[in-house]
């Protein structure tokens, strides 16, 4: 395993860093470090304008093939881009669901007409997407979705409810997993539909989080409609497409996420040195443990990615990634509050305003729940990586 970057890669790193330094200025300077987890609502219009600036510079959809508007970057160059974006304090991306989930899914499973219609608007930052998967009774068990779609002439009519839909209130479109055969087996009766969000049949109810933000929402479909052609893959063949989308969820951007974690750890260290918490041997050891844990996270990710670069399948070692970083980040939130001490219990007063580390701590409570709970992650590792027997399923 060679974790070094080539000379060409380092030239590319300098190009990305220079572009970020030249453009994250002026009207965009205030966006530095904003719009991340727990802070998604802030300056949304400005971040949407930033998305268009990225597009003008050719820095959206960097992993996509050039024929679809991307840069077709190598895996290591993708890593470099996400790292330098985070290092420069690039704001939370408002187009990341379309770029990292829907776009690659259409490239893999979509028709030529679908690619021509939807991909350019993702590249340009003109259309935003959200994901219609989870339901009140179908979170980790995606095959249990109850939202229904019935073909009526040349349109699908959709009825049901989705929940935890990130960025729903700002999105133009959603990719929605629906049940299209009420009598078929659970995994063989689902379809993957592209549904416009701005129509009378769609009601969005933002869910207020502990941070005071409403990053995600409940979405109710009541006779909502989309064209019959907006089904990705075969009708009743949506399970394979949905699993394909999930496979795209974790990739090179993980290294950029780790740079965001490093920025948070640096802030904790700065405060610890300022307020004297660094003199406490217990806190000092926890800070050191956090630093070591972050390095382990980086090296394991690079090991997994380098294995892919060598032409191999994604190794079972990659299955620990979500479990590891979610637990580490949750503990970092606790460390931040202990370093702040009594200050952690105090806000700036009305209007209710949290500091950066307070927002981070509250958001980290969800890290071990969303995108697959720790319990689900352990099941995946046990069953798929270690080959252990499947967990007994409760039947009614």
Image (spheres, rainbow, N blue to C red):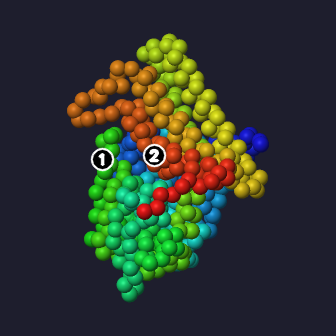
Query: Which quarter of the rendering shows the C terminus?
Result: bottom left
Q: Identify the image quadrant of residue 234.
A: bottom right
The answer to whether 195 is drawn above or below residue 91 in the figure is below
Mark in the foreground, 2 or 1: 2
- Residue 164, percent from left and from top: 38, 54
The answer to whether 192 is drawn above or below residue 386 in the figure is below
Number of residues whose C-alpha sits closer than 10 Å to that of mark 1, classed few (under 14), some (14–19) or many (20 or more): few
Give the labeled residue for mark 1.
Answer: 208
Give the labeled residue for mark 2.
Answer: 369
- Residue 258, percent from left and from top: 56, 39
Camera-side residue of 262 and 125: 262
Camera-side residue of 147 and 249: 147
Residue positioned 47% across, 42% down in the render? 367
Q: Is residue 40 left or right of residue 205?
A: right
Residue positioned 62% across, 28% down in the render? 292
- Residue 53, percent from left and from top: 47, 53
Q: Is residue 379 visible?
A: yes
């Amino acid at each position: 395993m060679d974790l070094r970057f080539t000379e060409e890669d380092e030239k590319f790193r300098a190009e990305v860093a220079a572009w970020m330094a030249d453009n994250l200025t002026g009207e965009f300077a205030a966006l530095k470090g904003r719009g991340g987890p727990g802070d998604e609502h802030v300056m949304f219009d400005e971040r949407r304008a930033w998305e268009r600036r990225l597009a003008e510079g050719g820095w959206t959809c960097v992993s996509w093939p050039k024929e679809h508007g991307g840069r077709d970057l190598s895996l290591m160059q993708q890593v470099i881009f996400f790292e330098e974006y985070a290092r420069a304090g690039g704001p939370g991306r408002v187009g990341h669901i379309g770029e990292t989930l829907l776009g690659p899914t259409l490239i893999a499973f979509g028709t030529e007409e679908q690619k021509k219609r939807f991909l350019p608007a993702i590249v340009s930052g003109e259309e935003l997407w959200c994901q219609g998967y989870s339901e009140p009774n179908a979170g980790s068990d995606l095959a249990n979705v109850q939202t229904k779609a019935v073909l009526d002439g040349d349109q699908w009519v959709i009825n049901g409810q989705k929940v935890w839909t990130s960025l729903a209130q700002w999105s133009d479109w959603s990719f929605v997993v629906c049940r299209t055969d009420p009598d078929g087996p659970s995994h063989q009766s689902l379809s993957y539909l592209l549904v416009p969000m701005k129509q009378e049949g769609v009601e969005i109810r933002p869910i207020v989080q502990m941070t005071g933000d409403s990053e995600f929402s409940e979405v109710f479909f009541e006779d909502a409609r989309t064209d019959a052609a907006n089904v990705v893959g075969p009708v009743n063949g949506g399970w394979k497409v949905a699993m394909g989308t999930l496979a795209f969820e974790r990739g090179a951007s993980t290294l950029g996420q780790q740079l965001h974690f490093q920025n948070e750890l640096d802030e904790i260290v700065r405060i610890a040195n300022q307020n004297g918490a660094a003199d406490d041997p217990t806190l000092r050891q926890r800070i050191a443990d956090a630093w070591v844990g972050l390095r382990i996270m980086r090296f394991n990710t690079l090991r997994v990615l380098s294995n892919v670069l060598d032409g191999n399948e994604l190794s079972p070692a990659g299955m620990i990634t979500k479990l590891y970083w979610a637990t580490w980040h949750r503990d970092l939130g606790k460390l931040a509050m202990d370093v702040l001490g009594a200050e952690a219990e105090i806000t700036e007063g009305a209007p209710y305003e949290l500091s950066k580390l307070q927002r981070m701590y509250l958001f980290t409570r969800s890290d071990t729940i969303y995108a697959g709970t720790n319990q689900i992650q352990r099941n995946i590792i046990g069953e798929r990586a270690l080959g252990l027997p499947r967990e007994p399923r409760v039947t009614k």
